[in-house]
Image: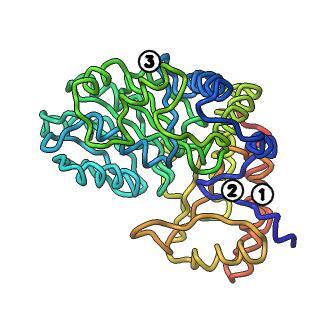
């Protein structure tokens, strides 16, 4: 094996295309120069179709969590109420951010592997009419659930004046998203997932409804003051030192998505999801989520004690140079997760499935070699 030929199939960070790596190797320029200002303004504009918005998209130097925190501290004050939809580890993170700032949090929790349904949210909001904001996770990375954000937005709009703030860190750029049409108030994502960049950038867009709240608030944060980002972007700059090289890479990522076509990018991710799920079913491996709520970017498999998920991951890593993710929190050591987003195509899924088949045999779990590969091939050829 070539030690530098690692196959990274985790739900972030994801592999970086060579042309994006090359773009990030460009000579450094001044972050207050006219050259960088033009790059920043143009790149921020090119992000709008991914968000499905005509609003400005703000580029932060920080991980996706920084944008989640920005969505909290600029919209809800200590002592005010918020609803947080928790279907896994990252919904839980949203709740913890709110609690850290003294916000009264009402958690709508569902079992890990389940999605939050519109019916459940409707009933929940009846019990908590005073919430100022509702926080949700579009793709729950820890389980592979894609929550029905469009339908959840409709419930919120019918029941309350609360803002709807959505974490789309692990799916934006790979799934349909129409922020303006659906009525999402704040939408955030990060660079190291479907956008094919290293960790280090986060992105946020806010609706006019959200800005009416933001403009009348004194934020509790300095670096994450959204009004400062709005003022700076109007001047084609950032309030604080940006990650210049990453923005060069971001511009190249936008070019790659534009060249493929966003609708084709979305179809590619849906095909890889369906291939992965068909393969796991053919091998008799239980999937954590229902088809209706399965994410196009990550698939979670629960062996249910049939074999050791960590032993499988170890064999994949040490003998096949393939890295898949494990479980989080109470699922640590119990499940494994396959990332299929960003710089990933259907033939890569075939490789992953073939390696999993071999690794299962190597750890003593008998599966029919080729069964998963065949199922994935059938989907790859016939996907509509």
- In the picture, the disc for residue 279 is 2
Asked if residue 218 can be seen in this view, the reply is: yes
Circle 1: is it few (<14), some (14-19), or many (20+) Cα within 10 Å? many
Asked if residue 378 can be seen in this view, the reply is: no
Residue to which mark 1 is pinned:
373
Residue to which mark 3 is pinned:
181
Point out the tag, 1 or 3, that comes first from the N-terminus.
3
Tell me which residue sits at (39%, 46%) in the image. Answer: 115
The Cα atoms of the two marked residues, 2 and 3, are separated by 35 Å
**Residue 243, placed above or below residue 332:** above
x then y, percent, for residue 129? 13, 33
Tell me which residue sits at (59%, 51%) in the image. Answer: 199
Quarter of the image for residue 70 reads top left
CB contact under 8 Å: marks 2 and 1: yes
Asked which colour scheme the image uses, the reply is rainbow
Q: Nearer the viewer, residue 67 or 371?
A: 67
Tell me which residue sits at (65%, 75%) in the image. Answer: 312
Q: The N terminus is located in which quarter?
A: bottom right
Report the label total: 3
In the picture, measured across the screen, residue 302 lies left or right of residue 102, that is right
Q: Secondary structure at mark 3?
A: helix
Tell me which residue sits at (38%, 27%) in the image. Answer: 184
Between tags 2 and 3, which lies in front? 3
Q: Secondary structure at mark 2?
A: helix
Point out the tag, 2 or 1, that comes first from the N-terminus.
2
Quarter of the image for residue 342 reads top right
The Cα atoms of the two marked residues, 1 and 3, are separated by 39 Å
């Amino acid at each position: 094996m070539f030690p530098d030929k690692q196959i990274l199939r985790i739900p972030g960070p994801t592999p970086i295309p060579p042309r994006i790596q090359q773009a990030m190797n460009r000579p450094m320029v001044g972050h207050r120069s006219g050259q960088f200002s033009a790059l920043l303004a143009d790149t921020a504009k090119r992000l709008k179709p991914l968000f499905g918005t005509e609003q400005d998209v703000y580029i932060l130097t920080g991980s996706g969590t920084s944008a989640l925190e920005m969505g909290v501290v600029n919209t809800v004050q200590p002592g005010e109420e918020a609803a947080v939809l928790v279907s896994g580890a990252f919904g839980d993170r949203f709740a913890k951010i709110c609690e850290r700032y003294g916000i009264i949090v009402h958690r709508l929790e569902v079992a890990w592997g389940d999605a939050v349904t519109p019916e459940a949210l409707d009933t929940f909001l009846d019990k908590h009419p005073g919430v100022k904001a509702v926080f949700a996770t579009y793709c729950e990375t820890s389980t592979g659930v894609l929550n029905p954000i469009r339908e959840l937005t409709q419930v919120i709009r019918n029941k309350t004046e609360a803002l709807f703030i959505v974490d789309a860190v692990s799916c934006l750029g790979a799934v349909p998203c129409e922020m303006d049409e659906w009525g999402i108030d704040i939408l955030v994502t990060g660079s190291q997932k479907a956008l094919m960049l290293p960790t280090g950038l986060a992105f946020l867009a806010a609706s006019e409804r959200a800005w009416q709240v933001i403009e009348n608030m004194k934020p509790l944060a300095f670096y994450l003051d959204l009004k400062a980002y709005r003022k700076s972007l109007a001047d084609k700059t950032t309030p604080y030192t940006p990650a210049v090289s990453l923005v060069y890479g971001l511009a190249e990522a936008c070019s790659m998505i534009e060249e493929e076509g966003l609708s084709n990018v979305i179809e590619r991710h849906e095909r890889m999801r369906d291939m992965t799920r068909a393969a796991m079913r053919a091998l008799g491996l239980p999937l954590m989520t229902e088809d209706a709520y399965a994410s196009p970017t990550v698939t979670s498999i629960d062996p249910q004690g049939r074999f050791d998920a960590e032993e499988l991951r170890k064999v994949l890593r040490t003998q096949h140079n393939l890295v898949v993710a494990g479980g989080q929190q109470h699922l640590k050591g119990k499940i494994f997760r396959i990332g299929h987003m960003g710089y990933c195509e259907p033939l890569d899924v075939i490789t992953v499935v073939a390696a999993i088949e071999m690794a299962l045999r190597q750890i003593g779990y008998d599966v029919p070699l080729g069964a998963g590969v065949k199922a994935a091939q059938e989907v790859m050829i016939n996907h509509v």
